[in-house]
């Protein structure tokens, strides 16, 4: 049974309680950021004040369809996070972002930033974009950077029961590294 994780994570102790291996169902407001948003962050863009403090940033370029004045989520396909590792400190320093969701994990540098800013990393299920979209109740564009539109824009997503697993926490666990080390150990035992 997944742990019900309610956003915002507006107090550091909430992040400290997220231990590696915990399955969660997220309810609250996430923000999204794809490669272009990360570039804008590096160029000095700041999240607007309306961004909820204690949110999670989903590495994703969402596919959305306008229906009247509302946006419907079609696909929320997570992107690999490691390519955005150099942006971790920048996002966390804004204080609105408390952690990240994607797949593939981060390296040791990100963990140092998690310790400094009280952050975490959760992994969701790659290849399940349409199924993840079913957890989105509402989507709205967030003004960020210059000229970001459509999938490249930063979006606020109100989600309910969004599935993920904590794979990097403040206690030092790193699930992707544990899997890598376990696989390497298993390979050593196989006859070649």
Image: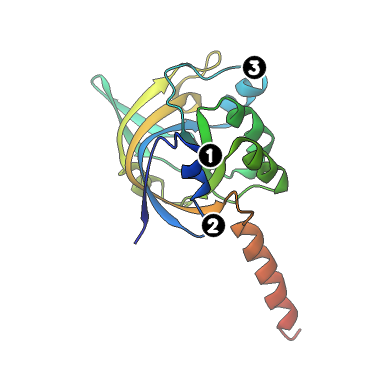
The answer to whether residue 66 is above or below residue 113 is: above
Of the residues under marks 1 and 2, which one precedes in the sequence? 2
Q: Quadrant of residue 63?
A: top left
**Residue 111: horizontal and vertical position, in percent?**
66, 45
**Which quadrant is the N terminus positioned in?**
bottom left
Residue lying at 51% horizontally and 26% vertically, measured from the top left: 152
Residue lying at 34% horizontally and 49% vertically, measured from the top left: 131
Marks 1 and 3 sit apart, C-alpha to C-alpha, by: 20 Å
Label 1: how many Cα within 10 Å (few below 14, some 14–19, many 20+): many
Of the residues under marks 2 and 3, which one precedes in the sequence? 2
The answer to whether residue 98 is above or below residue 143 is: below
Q: Residue furthest left?
A: 68
**Which quadrant is the C terminus positioned in?**
bottom right
Q: Quadrant of residue 182?
A: bottom right
Q: Which residue is mark 2?
A: 20
User: Is 46 displayed left or right of 128 in the figure?
Assistant: right
- Residues tagged 2 and 3 counted as in contact (Cβ below 8 A): no
Q: Which residue is mark 1?
A: 99
Marks 1 and 2 sit apart, C-alpha to C-alpha, by: 13 Å
Label 3: how many Cα within 10 Å (few below 14, some 14–19, many 20+): few
**Residue 51: horizontal and vertical position, in percent?**
44, 23
Marks 2 and 3 sit apart, C-alpha to C-alpha, by: 32 Å
Find numbered disc 1 in the image and state the secondary structure of the residue it sits on.
strand
- Residues tagged 1 and 2 counted as in contact (Cβ below 8 A): no
| Front of the two marks 1 and 3 | 1
Label 2: how many Cα within 10 Å (few below 14, some 14–19, many 20+): many
**Residue 34: horizontal and vertical position, in percent?**
54, 32
User: Is 185 displayed left or right of 104 in the figure?
Assistant: right
The disc label shown at residue 44, or none: 3
Residue 99 visible in the shown view? yes
């Amino acid at each position: 049974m997944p742990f019900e994780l309610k956003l915002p994570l507006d107090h550091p102790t909430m992040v400290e309680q997220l231990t590696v291996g915990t399955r969660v169902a997220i309810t609250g407001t996430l923000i999204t950021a794809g490669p272009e948003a990360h570039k804008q962050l590096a160029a000095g863009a700041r999240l607007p004040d309306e961004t909820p403090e204690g949110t999670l940033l989903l590495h994703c370029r969402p596919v959305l369809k306008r229906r009247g004045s509302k946006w419907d989520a079609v696909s929320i396909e997570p992107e690999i996070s490691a390519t955005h590792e150099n942006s971790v400190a920048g996002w966390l320093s804004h204080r609105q972002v408390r952690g990240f969701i994607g797949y593939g994990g981060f390296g040791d540098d990100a963990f140092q930033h998690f310790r400094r800013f009280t952050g975490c990393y959760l992994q969701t299920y790659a290849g399940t974009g349409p199924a993840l979209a079913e957890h989105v109740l509402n989507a709205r564009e967030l003004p960020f950077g210059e000229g970001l539109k459509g999938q490249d824009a930063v979006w606020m997503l109100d989600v309910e029961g969004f599935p993920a697993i904590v794979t990097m926490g403040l206690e030092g666990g790193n699930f992707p590294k544990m899997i890598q080390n376990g696989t390497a150990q298993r390979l050593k035992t196989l006859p070649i």
